[in-house]
Image: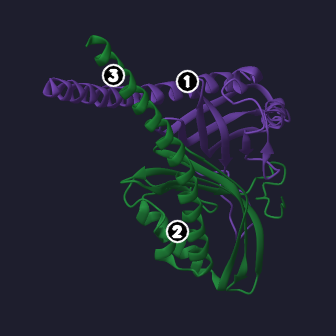
Chain colours: A green, B purple
Amino acid sequence: MKMTKLALISVLSLACISLLWMSRAYSAANDDTEIRQLLDRWKKAFEAKDLNGIMSIYEPGQALVAYDIVPPLQYKGFDAYKKDYQEFLGQFDGPIGMEIRDLNIVAGDRVAFARGLERLSGTLKGGHKLDMWVRFTECYRKTNGHWLAIHDHVSVPADFDTGKAVMDLKP
Amino acid sequence: MKMTKLALISVLSLACISLLWMSRAYSAANDDTEIRQLLDRWKKAFEAKDLNGIMSIYEPGQALVAYDIVPPLQYKGFDAYKKDYQEFLGQFDGPIGMEIRDLNIVAGDRVAFARGLERLSGTLKGGHKLDMWVRFTECYRKTNGHWLAIHDHVSVPADFDTGKAVMDLKP
């Protein structure tokens, strides 16, 4: 009888480990897909200048902190970042172009990040045409089974000799 | 006897869940501590211009990609980023000052990120004194039980009206 119990425990343990392993592999593939969909939703909303669509990928509240391409050093909280987006979109005449390249997503169980290059193009209200590549890093956490962004970092490099922001780089 | 087996399975399941829960909470606290120690090690090495000490926090190989404060858009791979660090450190006369503020670490089981502000100060070889605040985002993954950085993003904001990199902001 002791052997039977031992066998039962062993089988249960193995089944438990196998299930955990399988669910982890399944979840990792799903996480990657879900974050890709989130970025695709963001891209479409950004191009359409749909502020609420854009903000739907971010976690509401104070945890969200963004280091944007424009000053100040940081935007603290969902509302501050939403206002930043609103002002940014307001500078453009017509739609905005957005292309994402070199996208890389690394996802764990509750924390993930994406990085890549973005080509931002459009016409500013003064008539000036904008067409530039920027770098982005976006960090996520999973809440109630779904990924939401809690940190953005968007920038161009700086030239220390001239003090200029380098906006004409191409990948 | 059937009841005994059922009771045994129940107790084992509960014990299993409790252990998983405890190990997860313990691991999360440990992950946070380990990443803080890694950043502290990086800071000391950076201030001492110890290139190998700096690079000890990064994952060797091609997964590491950095968006640095200076051009180009991206540094691909450990060796390219090491060369970037080497050139950066070579610009300074004497030690470099580094202060980290508003540090925030979010760690999952295999992926984590840290973000914050860095005050970088020192004297360049031409005699020019540098004292500036930059934003940083650093992303990690756990390999063989230890955290290593696989992505850096360091920047200052850009002023779209003047085309200048904004290097005089204070938190």
Query: Can you give x and y, in whole percent of width and height, for residue A102 in the image?
Result: 75, 56
| Numbered mark located on residue A84 in the image | 2
| Numbered mark located on residue B145 in the image | 1
Pointer 3 chain: A
Q: Is residue A89 in view from this perspective?
A: yes
Seen in the picture, residue A90 relative to A134 is either above or below; the reply is: below
Specify the quadrant that holds the N terminus of chain A: top left
The residue drawn where x is 80% and y is 59% is: A166
Pointer 2 chain: A
Left-right relation of A169 to B119: right
Closest to the observer, A82 or B2: B2
The residue drawn where x is 57% and y is 33% is: B99
Q: Is residue B26 in view from this perspective?
A: no
The residue drawn where x is 37% and y is 58% is: A61
What whole-number distance in Å separates the C-alpha atoms at marks 2 and 3?
Answer: 57 Å
The residue carrying mark 3 is: A9
Left-right relation of A43 to B64: left
